[in-house]
């Protein structure tokens, strides 16, 4: 372990990339770079990929999904121990095992999808069967994302339905709009996003 600590501390990019995993949740290389910029202001996307490769070779980082876009990386147990020793902090949380990480990746690489899923979780107020419509979702998103249109919200909802993140809950009382509820997987992914 001592060799690993010295190895990380010898490189500012390694230290910065390792620090990005503080919360313990899987991250894309883009997210890692944005977090690493706090410690290494000149780190590029190429640097992040190189350092992730080094961590992967040493079995400290693992890619956990098979997505062509939005590859997700998490710390292994040895990576969590290394983090704890390098930063003198508790080990980051373990990555939940019952999440479809390909779906998670699909959600986080789209800012509208990510915002919409978080908003749906907020709309359901933690109640498993709280139903919502596309229009309600868009209205509640308008405060944080003023440029979001009804078609953008509708597209996100269609994608969520296609991938099983939401389920149909019938129609409104007047029968004009469809209502949806978060599926179990949709709720789990939203919980991970909320941290």
Image (spheres, rainbow, N blue to C red):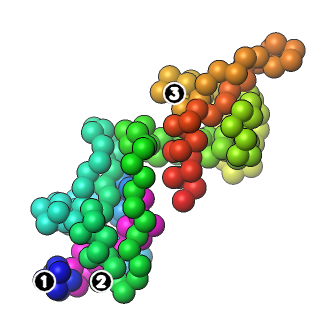
Residue 174 visible in image: yes
Mark pair 2, 3: CA separation: 40 Å
- Residue matched to label 1: 3
Q: Which residue is mark 2?
A: 85
Task: Give the residue number, with chain letter if any, for mark 3.
Answer: 164
Q: Quadrant of the N terminus?
A: bottom left
Using the numbered discs, state the Cα–Cα distance from disc 2 to disc 1 in whole angstroms: 11 Å
How much space separates mark 1 and mark 3, taking CA atoms? 45 Å
Q: Position of residue 184 (x, y in %)?
A: 56, 36
Nearer to us in this view, 94 or 13: 94
Q: Where is 28 relative to 163, above or below? A: below
Where residue 141 appears, as percent x and y from the top left, is 70, 43
Residue 151 drawn above or below residue 56 = above
Task: Name, please, the residue furthest toward the top.
Answer: 175
- Magenta residues span 8-25
Answer above or below: position of 139 versus 118: above
Q: Point out the residue furthest to the right here.
A: 174
Q: Residues within 10 Å of mark 3 (few under 14, many from 20)?
A: some
| Among numbered discs 1 and 3, the one appearing first in the sequence | 1
Pinpoint residue 24: horizontal percent, then vertical percent: 41, 64
The question of residue 156 being in magenta is answered with: no
Q: Secondary structure at mark 2?
A: helix
Q: Are marks 2 and 1 in contact (CB under 8 Å)?
A: no
Nearest the eye: 127 or 179: 127
Q: Residues within 10 Å of mark 2 (few under 14, many from 20)?
A: some
Is the residue 13 above or below the residue 97 in the image?
below
From the viewer's perspective, tell me whether residue 73 is left or right of residue 49: right
Query: How far from the left and from the top, in percent, is residue 156?
Result: 57, 31
Task: Name which residue lies at 35% across and 84% down.
Answer: 87
- Say which quarter of the image contains residue 40: bottom left
First-in-chain label (2 vs 3): 2
């Amino acid at each position: 372990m001592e060799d690993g600590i010295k190895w990380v501390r010898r490189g500012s990019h390694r230290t910065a990339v390792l620090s990005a995993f503080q919360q313990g949740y899987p991250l894309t290389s883009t997210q890692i770079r944005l977090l690493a910029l706090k410690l290494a202001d000149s780190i590029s996307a190429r640097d992040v990929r190189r350092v992730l490769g080094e961590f992967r070779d040493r079995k400290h980082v693992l890619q956990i999904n098979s997505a062509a876009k939005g590859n997700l990386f998490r710390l292994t147990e040895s990576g969590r121990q290394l983090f704890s020793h390098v930063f003198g902090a508790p080990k980051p949380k373990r990555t939940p095992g019952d999440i479809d990480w390909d779906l998670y990746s699909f959600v986080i690489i789209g800012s509208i999808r990510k915002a919409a899923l978080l908003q749906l979780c907020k709309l359901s107020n933690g109640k498993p069967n709280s139903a919502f419509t596309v229009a309600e979702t868009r209205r509640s998103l308008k405060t944080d994302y003023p440029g979001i249109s009804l078609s953008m919200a509708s597209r996100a909802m269609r994608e969520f339905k296609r991938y099983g993140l939401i389920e149909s809950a019938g129609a409104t009382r007047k029968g004009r709009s469809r209502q949806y509820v978060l599926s179990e997987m949709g709720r789990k992914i939203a919980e991970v996003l909320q941290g």
